[in-house]
Image (cartoon, rainbow, N blue to C red):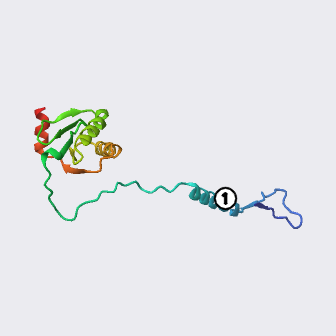
Amino acid sequence: MAEVDVKQSRGKQKHSKKKKRRIGVRIDMTPMVDIAFLLLTFFMLTTTMNKPQAMEINLPPGESKVDVPASNLLTLRVSENGTIYWNIGTDKPEKVTAAELKKVLKEKNSANPKLITLIKVDRKGKYIMMVNIMDELNVSDITRFSLAPFDDKDKQLIEKI
């Protein structure tokens, strides 16, 4: 582990003044390196390797337009402050809380099984709002939904309310 080298003097010294002996110290670093690698491998093997969470979105090939009757389109608009508005077709948008959203989604989809939900989130809004709405759609077993950009037309429509 550690070693101290002490040099022995050969013979008597003539001077009465004694010189200080220099002691050489040599430390063996092998055990410390072994411990360091042991800890490194321990922490590497015991940490959990998480896969990044990603949401799979299937996009149609190219730019294709699908004509959907207004009566089969439920539009959810989320403003930048997180307020949610919903309407069907060209009806006037109504304000709904996040807690009431699940009830509205189930009610409207049970009334019309061909209903497609269109989600529009303001660019300045929080990403978590879109994820929460998509989670509510998933919990409500709604598989027919689409994402669309939030236009100035949508802002004006919400400001009128």
Q: Position of residue 69 (x, y in %)?
A: 13, 49
Residue 88 location, quadrant: top left
Return the residue nearer the eye: 26 or 35.
35
Q: So how many labels did they put on this image?
A: 1
In which image quadrant can residue 122 be found? top left
In which quadrant of the rendered image does the C terminus lie? top left
Please tell me which residue lies in front, 24 or 151.
Answer: 151
Who is closer to the viewer here, 66 or 21? 66
The residue that appears at 89% across and 64% down in the rendered structure is: 12
In the rendering, at what x and y percent does residue 153 appear?
Answer: 10, 43
Q: Residue at x 13, y 55 (%)?
A: 67
Q: Secondary structure at mark 1?
A: helix
Image quadrant occupied by the N terminus: bottom right
What is the residue that sits farthest to the bottom in this orientation? Answer: 10
What's the residue type where badge 1 is placed? Ile
Query: Residue beneath label 1, please?
Result: 35
- Neighbours of disc 1 within 10 Å: few (<14), some (14-19), many (20+): few
